[in-house]
Structures are given as structure tokens and as C-alpha cells.
Amino acid sequence: MATENPHVLLEMSDEPDCRFVAAWLSKAAEAQTFWSQALQDPQFDDHIQLLHGDGIADLAAAALEILGELEHHRHVASLDLYQHEDGLFSIEFVMLVQLGFFVVGGSSYWMAIPEAVTLTAVKQAALDVLSTTEDWDGLEILQPERQLHTLSAEEANAWRLRLIMMRRFGTERNQGYADGRTQQ
């Protein structure tokens, strides 16, 4: 669902789980290593040139930024996909979703640990982002948010506050998703 000023709602379990966070960050570092390797392939790099017209995506840095936001905002965060003018965060987030670092559950994305991150999967994630390119009067524009469930800033913030209240009062929504499963 495309939204003007697209935001995503992110959640993580309230239960402190250092092993989960360490494994998640380790997988993000692995993804970044494969991304760097992919960019070393001149043919692939030429093909995805549009993805790094304003800078090169950094999956590990994006993962750290997301984790910091979740920790800072009581484990529920509303993030602007275009918080930076260069639009890199939207590319990074879509790639992380494509790689399995987040699963959608209702209106939000939950942190998950991908089973395997490979060079092929990272290249495919980049190609998936590239597939959102549209031609606007001869100018190619990436719209990675087209591959996400997005909300307006107002909707995302309202959901965020609602989820925090639900967590505070211990409703069933607060059951941990640390293993990356969605609620059935």
C-alpha cells in the first residue's frame, strides 16, 4: 500500500533477549558483508547503479539504527522511510525485509532472524528494490515503499501509542515474537 510520507511501524519483544539481539545483529553484519561482495561484481554493480545514486546502502548501519530506535521508543517505533534526504533508509529497510529480518504481523513489522543470508539472496533483495523503479518524465525514480505495508505518519504514531498501551496493560499482543513467528 503506497502512502504519502510513508512510515513503517516496527516492534520487538518486551522480553530482554540478548541472544536474539546478538544473533540478529550478527546476521545483519553477514548481510552487509555479502552486500559489499555484491558491489565488487562490476556487472551487478552497473545493473543496480540507480540504488546507490545518492550513496551506498549500509545494511549493518541500518540494523543498528533500527535497533536503537526500538530500544529508545519502548520496543515499538514508527519510522519515516524518508527520514534522510538521500532515501537510503527506505532501500536498506526493504532489503532487510526481503532478507527476512522483519516479518509483517498486522500493521507492524516484527524483528526476525533469517534462517540463512546468502550472496544470492542479497543480490535478489537489491533487484527487488530496483523493480520498484518508475519512469517520471524520463527520470527513473525508485519507490521501494511499494513493497511494504506502510502507514501515514499519523496512523503509524497512533498505532505506536496504542501498542505501547496494550503492552503496558499486558494484552495478548505483548506475547514475544523473538523467534520471528507471526501471531496465528
Image (cartoon, rainbow, N blue to C red):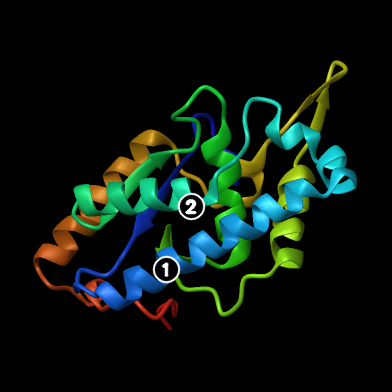
Name the residue type under label 1: Trp
C-alpha gap between disc 1 and disc 2: 10 Å
Tell me if residue 183 can be seen.
yes
| In the image: residue 101, left or right of residue 158 | right
Above/below status of 91 relative to 116: above
Which residue matches tag 2? 60
Residue at x 47%, y 73% (from the top left corner): 113
Please say whether residue 111 is visible from this viewpoint.
Answer: no
How far across and how far down the image is residue 137, in percent? 85, 16
Residue of label 1: 24
Counting every numbered tag in the picture gives 2
- Three-letter amino acid code at disc 2? Ala
The quadrant of the rendering that contains the C terminus is bottom left
| 15 in relation to 59, above or below | below
**Is 165 displayed left or right of 47 in the figure?**
left
Q: Is residue 70 above or below residue 118?
A: above
The residue at 49%/30% (across/down) is 5
**Left or right: where 145 falls relative to 158:** right
Q: At which x and y percent is residue 62?
A: 46, 46
Residue farthest along the top direction in this orientation: 137
Residue 142 relative to residue 136: left or right: left
Q: Can you tell which quarter of the image residue 51 is in? A: top right
Q: Alpha-carbon neighbours of circle 2 within 10 Å: few (<14), some, or many (≥20)?
A: many
